Structures are given as C-alpha cells and as structure tokens.
C-alpha cells in the first residue's frame, strides 16, 4: 500500500522503480521485440526524463496495486492474529505432550558424571562418578518424553527395538519415559518431540529445554559386584523417576541400579 501511494504522487519514483526492477527493456531494447521500446527517445532510462509511455505506466501501476492489495490481504490483522493463534496452540500442545522431562540435580553434573566403558562384561557404556558423594545425594530424574506405553511399544519400538532398553516403564504400565531420539538411539541430550516436525521444533526453537541423558547409562550390577548404589523412586502423579545414591560412592566407582523384575534381560551375555 505504502509503495503504491507514494509512487502515484511522484512520477520520478515510478521511473526509478521500473528501471531498478526490470532494467533490460530500457537499456537493451535490441533484445526486445516489443515495438514500444524501439523508439530512440525511449531507449535509455535517464534520471528525471520519462522513457515510459502512459500505457506502460498505467499497466505497471495497476499491477502494483493488485500486488499491494494481495499482500495486505495476507498481512491483514485478522490473518496475522489467526496464524499467531495457530502457532501458539501448536507450541502449547508440543510443550504439554512432547517436552523432554527429567533433569540432572547432582552438584556440578557436567564434571561429576562420566560416561565410560562399563566394568560389567558386554554391558557397553556405564556411568561413573568422578568425585565422592554421600548416600542420599540426588542424581536427578530420568530423562525422556512421556509416551502412552501401549502406543510406544506398538509403534516406535517395532521400528527401533533398541528404544525399549532405555525407556522407563512406570509400574502402573500406563506410560513410559522415552529418552531416545526419533530413530530410537541415545543422543547426549534428550530434546523432546514426537514426529519429524515437532523434533525439529524442539531441536531448534526449544533446544534450551534439552536434558542430559547421562542417567540412561546406568547399568545393572553384575553378580558378585556388591549390589546397587543407586535407587529409583517413582512419582506416578508427576510421572517422574528420581535417582538417589543409596550408598556412599567414592571417586571412580560405577553406578548400578536394579531395573526391576519386568525388565527384558534377554540381550544380557550368558553368565
Ligand atoms: C539403560 S541401558 C544402560 C546403558 C548401556 N550399557 C549403554 O551402553 O548405553 C540398559 C542396557 O545396558 C545393558 N546392561 C545393563 N546392565 C547390564 C548387565 N548387568 N549385564 C549385561 N548388560 C547390561 C543391556 O544391554 C541393557 O539393555
């Protein structure tokens, strides 16, 4: 709108705008078959001198006005309000359903939790403490996106079965915390998300919500290793699982947790 009205009040501004948008008819008439460009008086766009016929000017102005009116329809306050409302609703749903839960609460988590090769044969990686901590220290709560258990097992785990081993199934069997990415793998962080679009939103716009996945590396103790030094407490209301040291742990020790009776241990190496 602004562009159209200022152009109407100043003939020079039409000319400059046209020369900028499409200089070729004005500067290279020989390559253009349209006769109206072939008169020598119209060959060059000289500032301050009109090289346009009234017909071209009027057609151009009409096109400008049509473009302006469609832009102002797209940018109308109603259209802007509608898209803002859709975006807000979408973001609220994402935050309610697909946000990453859990947190690390151990003091100086970045330096005190170390992921390394487990001392348990064939168990892969494990989690170790690089400082000594007393019994009762809260490590944090298990990371993951809360998903309905039935849906999680019948969809994502069918395609990416490795996701099962890292998910925390609540004892009422209704929900799981799934810390894996969209391909069922453990990344350094759980970003959140449920499909390609929401994953992308969580990894970009909402990446500040990401949660470290260190607690997913805690193994079960091997037979004869002296049992667990971490205990888990579920809160079914909050859908939260808090991990606490149930013994004093000295620097360099690996953390061990009992996964519970229902955990599938079929992939454990035979003892
Ligand atoms: C929650 S993950 C623990 C982290 C895992 N070790 C890793 O490398 O990411 C659970 C998986 O670790 C392995 N694991 C844990 N405790 C084990 C044990 N005592 N013996 C053999 N494998 C074990 C199993 O493969 C199990 O499915």
Image (cartoon, rainbow, N blue to C red):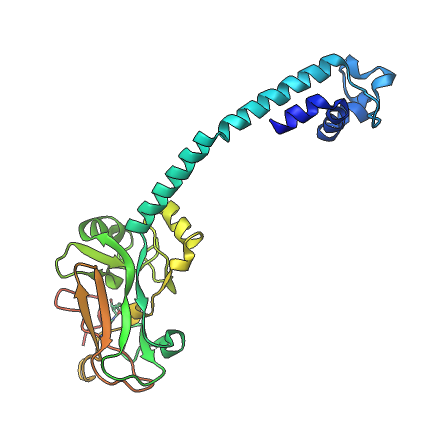
Q: Residue at 58% x, 20% y: name it.
A: 66
Q: Is residue 162 visible?
A: no
Q: Residue at 32% x, 51% y: name it.
A: 95
- Front in this rendered view, residue 159 or 208: 208
69 displayed left or right of 125:
right
- Front in this rendered view, residue 217 or 43: 43
Name which quarter of the figure residue 10 lies in.
Answer: top right
Counting from the top left corner in percent of width and height, residue 162 is at: 28, 59
Name which quarter of the figure residue 187 lies in.
Answer: bottom left
Instruction: Report the quarter where the C terminus lies.
Output: bottom left
Counting from the top left corner in percent of width and height, residue 226 is at: 19, 84
Is 125 situated above or below 79? below
Name which quarter of the figure residue 142 lies in.
Answer: bottom left
Q: Residue at 36% x, 82% y: name it.
A: 130
Q: Is residue 101 visible?
A: yes
- Front in this rendered view, residue 12 or 195: 12
228 displayed left or right of 69:
left
């Amino acid at each position: 709108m602004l562009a159209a009205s200022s152009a109407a009040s100043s003939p020079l501004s039409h000319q400059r705008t046209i020369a900028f948008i499409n200089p070729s008819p004005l500067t290279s008439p020989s390559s253009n078959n349209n006769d109206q460009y072939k008169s020598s008086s119209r060959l060059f766009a000289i500032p301050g001198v009109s090289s346009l016929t009234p017909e071209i000017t009027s057609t151009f102005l009409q096109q400008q006005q049509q473009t302006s009116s469609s832009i102002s329809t797209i940018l109308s306050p109603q259209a802007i309000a509608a898209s803002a409302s859709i975006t807000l609703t979408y973001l609220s749903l994402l935050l309610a359903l697909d946000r990453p839960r859990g947190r690390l609460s151990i003091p100086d988590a970045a330096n005190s939790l170390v992921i390394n090769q487990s001392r348990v044969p064939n168990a892969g990686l494990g989690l170790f403490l690089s400082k000594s901590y007393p019994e009762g220290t809260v490590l944090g709560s298990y990371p993951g996106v809360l998903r309905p258990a039935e849906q999680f097992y019948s969809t994502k785990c069918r395609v990416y079965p490795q996701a099962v081993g890292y998910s925390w199934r609540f004892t009422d069997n209704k929900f799981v915390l799934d810390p894996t990415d969209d391909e069922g793998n453990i990344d350094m962080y759980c970003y959140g998300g449920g499909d390609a679009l929401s994953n992308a939103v969580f990894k970009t716009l909402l990446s500040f919500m990401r949660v470290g996945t260190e607690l997913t590396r805690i193994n079960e103790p091997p037979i004869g290793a002296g049992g667990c030094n971490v205990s888990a407490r579920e809160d079914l209301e909050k859908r939260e699982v808090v991990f606490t040291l149930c013994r004093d742990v000295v620097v360099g020790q690996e953390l061990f947790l009992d996964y519970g009776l229902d955990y599938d241990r079929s992939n454990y190496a035979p003892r």
